Amino acid sequence: MEPLEVVAAVLVRDGRVLACRRAPGKDAAGLWEFPGGKVEQGETPETALVREIREELGVGILVGELVDRSVTEAGGRPIDLACYRAELTGELPTRSTDHDALLWVRTTELAALEWAAADVPAVRVLTA
């Protein structure tokens, strides 16, 4: 089965990283993740990430360096997740279409959250 190509933003502000908890009724409900989503046909990962963050969090970002790219499995399907550092271009996000909680946490606190499987490799890189 072809991996699902997904991108996520590691948003850092004042030494804290944005973690988002999947809302009830969503895949991986109750688990934490970095915000993002699927790469659509014809999009670069960076373009997809800007679009997804605008749709999901209602804010703009500048995409930076790749933090981690790993293939994991979720729901019997391989997920190819590329996590990029990103910088907010305006206001802070206050809501999400896919999450019921947004939390700014220190990198030293990331491991205390229960992360979705696809995000675990990036969490390991950030906490190393």
Image (spheres, rainbow, N blue to C red):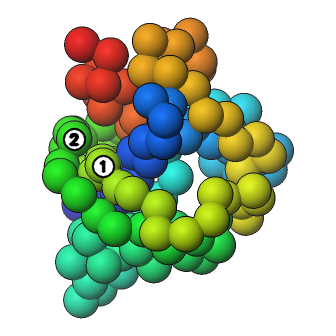
- On residue 98, the disc is none
Q: Is residue 28 left or right of residue 37?
A: right
Q: Which amino acid does label 1 sit on?
A: Arg
Rendered image quadrant of residue 114:
top right
Residue designated by label 2: 67
The secondary element bearing badge 1 is classed as strand
* Separation of marks 2 and 1 at Cα, in angstroms: 6 Å
Circle 2 packing at 10 Å, graded few (<14), some (14-19), many (20+), is some
Q: In this view, does 47 lie above or below 31?
A: below
Q: Nearer the viewer, residue 72 or 45?
A: 45
x, y percent for residue 11 = 44, 47
**Mark 2: amino acid:** Val
| Residue furthest out toward the front | 14
- In the drawing, does residue 107 fall left or right of residue 127? right
Q: Which residue is at 21% across, 39% downward? A: 68
Which is nearer the N-term, disc 2 or disc 1?
A: 2
Residue of label 1: 85
Name the residue rendered at 29%, 64% in the picture.
63
Asked if marks 2 and 1 touch (Cβ < 8 Å), the reply is: yes
* Residue 111 location (% of width, % of height): 48, 13
Which image quadrant is residue 125 in?
top left
Q: Give the position of the N terminus as an image quadrant.
A: bottom left
Left or right of 51 in this view: 28: right
Q: Can residue 53 be seen in this view?
A: yes
Residue placed most toward the observer, 123 or 108: 108
Helix, strand or loop at label 2? It is: strand
Examine the image and state in which quarter residue 20 appears.
top right
Q: Nearer the viewer, residue 126 or 81?
A: 126
Where residue 29 appears, x then y in whole percent? 71, 39
Residue visible at 30% across and 79% down in the picture: 47
